[in-house]
Image (cartoon, rainbow, N blue to C red):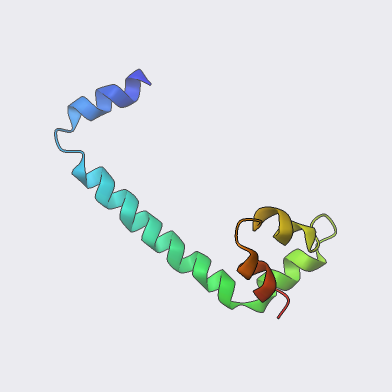
């Protein structure tokens, strides 16, 4: 933790950290949304012996509309 505190003192304006994090998040969101657009992702998870449809119900429990879209 002390390392991060020292880094904060070395950089007087942490605004660039916020900008970089937001840009990174935007890029990740772009690629994750592409996964949502391909049926291969859903098929691979559903057919995987360790996951099946239970994966969607567990991981996406707070987004039931996503679970309904997946089998389409």
Residue extending farthest top: 2
Q: Is residue 58 above or below residue 6?
A: below
Residue extending farthest right: 49
Q: Position of residue 69 (x, y in %)?
A: 65, 75
Left or right placement of residue 29 versus residue 15 in this view: right
Left or right placement of residue 37 versus residue 57 in this view: left
Please identify the quarter of the rendering in which residue 48 is found: bottom right
Q: Position of residue 72 (x, y in %)?
A: 70, 81
Please identify the quarter of the rendering in which residue 15 is found: top left
Left or right placement of residue 15 versus residue 21 in this view: left
In depth, the one of 10 and 19 nearer the eye is 19
Residue extending farthest bottom: 72
Please identify the quarter of the rendering in which residue 51 is found: bottom right
Q: Is residue 4 above or below residue 72?
A: above
Q: Residue at x 57, y 77 (%)?
A: 37
Q: Position of residue 33 (x, y in %)?
A: 50, 70
């Amino acid at each position: 933790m002390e390392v991060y505190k020292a880094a904060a003192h070395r950089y007087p304006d942490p605004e660039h950290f916020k900008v970089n994090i937001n840009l990174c998040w935007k890029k990740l969101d772009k690629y994750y949304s592409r996964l949502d657009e391909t049926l291969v992702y859903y098929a691979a998870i559903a057919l995987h012996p360790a996951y099946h449809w239970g994966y969607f119900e567990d991981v996406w429990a707070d987004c039931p509309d996503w679970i309904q879209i997946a089998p389409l």
